[in-house]
């Protein structure tokens, strides 16, 4: 479309400017030629140019018709003033007229670009920017609805427009339409884009949930669980999965989902609200006389007891010191790491504290605030290995020549303060 408009612009420039800039000698070579004959010749030349552009397929039929109509109109106007052709005194007025028409052409080209090109998308973007700064008027919302729908129709492969349309519909409470928009968007996402698919799947389930008067169904619950397989630590699908499970009476599963979310949340209103939901689910289990732990496994506890000890904040207090041998071997500015790792888990620490040797002995606290990756905290596990290491390279991975001390099977909750002496040389 843009290429077509550019060709149209170039053609009209040639049509308007070239005749006015013809050299006088060119006109003097035809002293007997009338204006009518010259106009007819130029008309035929331009008509051939238009046919050439039409054959290229770069310009729509509507644009070709507009160009032909304009050419016919010029010929008609020229026929009214049938005078002798001259390149002398009349050249300046022609030049001024051509410049005027050139300016009109630029304006018309811009208008056509706005009408046939990206004008709709530009206006939609402007309205979206306005909505982020202030509340849109009802008429502006209606206009944005129409323009986003048009953008989605014109650019079906552009996922951004489809996403924005779904979000707008959802914000307006048109949940069923939003769910349809998300479903269409999901169908166009490649399977390899797991994070995007999980996010859109979650939005689709949420929209369908609200469209169904906030009533859960096994189908919706299965869909949100699919999203969790692709994004197991994402907060939104975890919270929504917990809601679905609770509404369906799967109280233990609700607790399992909400626990994974709860350990990621900082202390505050959201965490307290989630705690209340977890406790209500636990009360439902207790009322049913079900004896299960947070992973759904049977425990040797009294009937009706639900284990929520994991809701006690995870906290490990560690006092780190250097042995005399280590003190003599390290430098004051050597890096010291205090790390907590999952037993038999990945090398990525669940909590870490960085110090320098000159600070030892020192007491530090490892808790969820020391996590290196969201969702991977010491609060998400029951036992860890705590390591204190002097790193000569400044890297947390142990290397030959480092010094360290370790304590295994440390409970993340309710444990006594630890004391670690760094005394072993890494080989």
Image (cartoon, rainbow, N blue to C red):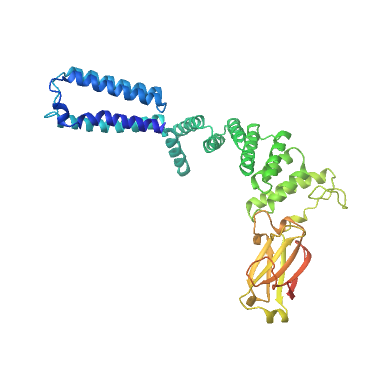
The answer to whether 7 is drawn above or below residue 262 in the figure is above
Q: Position of residue 221 (x, y in %)?
A: 71, 37
Tell me if 248 is positioned left or right of 353 in this view. right
- Viewer-closest of 335 and 136: 335
In percent of the image, x 83 and y 50: which residue is there? 305
Tell me if 406 is positioned left or right of 17 in this view. right
The answer to whether 230 is drawn above or below residue 143 in the figure is below
Q: Position of residue 44 (x, y in %)?
A: 27, 20
- Viewer-closest of 257 and 160: 160
In percent of the image, x 65 and y 36: which residue is there? 205
Q: Position of residue 190 (x, y in %)?
A: 62, 38
Q: Quadrant of the N terminus?
A: top left
Residue 71 appears in view: yes
Q: Quadrant of residue 2?
A: top left
Q: Quadrant of the C terminus?
A: bottom right
The answer to whether 226 is drawn above or below residue 19 in the figure is below
Q: How many marks?
A: 0
Residue 416 appears in view: no
The answer to whether 120 is drawn above or below residue 235 in the figure is above
Q: Quadrant of residue 374?
A: bottom right
- Viewer-closest of 350 and 346: 346
In percent of the image, x 68 and y 55: which residue is there? 376
Q: Quadrant of residue 162?
A: top right
Residue that sits furthest to the front in the current view = 29
- Viewer-closest of 254 and 158: 158
Q: Position of residue 369 (x, y in %)?
A: 65, 60
């Amino acid at each position: 479309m843009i290429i077509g408009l550019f060709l149209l612009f170039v053609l009209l420039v040639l049509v308007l400017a070239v005749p006015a800039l013809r050299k006088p000698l060119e006109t003097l070579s035809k002293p007997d030629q009338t204006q009518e004959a010259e106009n007819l010749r130029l008309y035929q030349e331009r008509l051939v140019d238009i046919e050439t552009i039409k054959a290229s397929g770069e310009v729509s039929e509507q644009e070709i018709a507009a160009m032909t109509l304009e050419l016919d109109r010029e010929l008609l106007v020229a026929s009214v003033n049938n005078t002798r052709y001259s390149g002398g005194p009349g050249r300046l007025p022609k030049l001024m007229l051509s410049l005027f028409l050139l300016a009109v052409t630029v304006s018309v080209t811009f208008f056509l670009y706005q009408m046939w090109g990206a004008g709709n998308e530009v206006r939609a973007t402007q309205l979206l920017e306005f909505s982020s700064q202030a509340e849109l008027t009802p008429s502006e919302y209606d206009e944005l609805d129409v323009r986003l729908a048009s953008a989605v129709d014109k650019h079906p492969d552009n996922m951004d427009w489809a996403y924005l349309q779904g979000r707008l519909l959802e914000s307006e409470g048109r949940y069923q339409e939003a769910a349809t928009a998300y479903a269409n968007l999901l169908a166009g996402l490649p399977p390899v884009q797991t994070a995007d698919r999980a996010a859109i799947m979650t939005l689709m389930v949420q929209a369908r949930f609200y469209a169904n008067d906030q009533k859960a169904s096994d189908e919706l619950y299965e869909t949100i669980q699919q999203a969790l397989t692709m994004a197991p630590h994402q907060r939104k699908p975890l919270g929504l999965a917990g809601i679905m499970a609770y509404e369906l009476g799967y109280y233990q599963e609700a607790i399992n989902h909400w626990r994974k979310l709860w350990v990621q949340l900082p202390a505050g209103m959201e965490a307290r609200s989630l705690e209340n939901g977890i406790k209500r689910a636990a009360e439902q289990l207790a009322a049913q006389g079900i004896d299960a732990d947070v992973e759904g496994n049977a425990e040797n506890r009294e009937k009706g007891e639900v284990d929520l000890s994991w809701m006690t904040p995870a906290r490990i207090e560690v006092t780190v010191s250097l042995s005399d041998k280590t003190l003599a071997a390290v430098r004051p500015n050597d890096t010291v790491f205090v790390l907590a790792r999952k037993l038999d888990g990945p090398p990525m620490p669940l909590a870490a504290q960085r110090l320098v040797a000159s600070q030892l002995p020192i007491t530090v606290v490892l808790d969820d605030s020391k996590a290196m990756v969201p969702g991977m905290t010491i609060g998400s596990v029951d036992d860890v290995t705590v390591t204190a290491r002097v790193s000569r390279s400044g890297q947390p991975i142990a290397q030959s020549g480092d010094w360290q001390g370790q304590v295994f099977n440390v409970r993340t909750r309710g444990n006594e303060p630890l004391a670690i002496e760094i005394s072993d040389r890494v080989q």
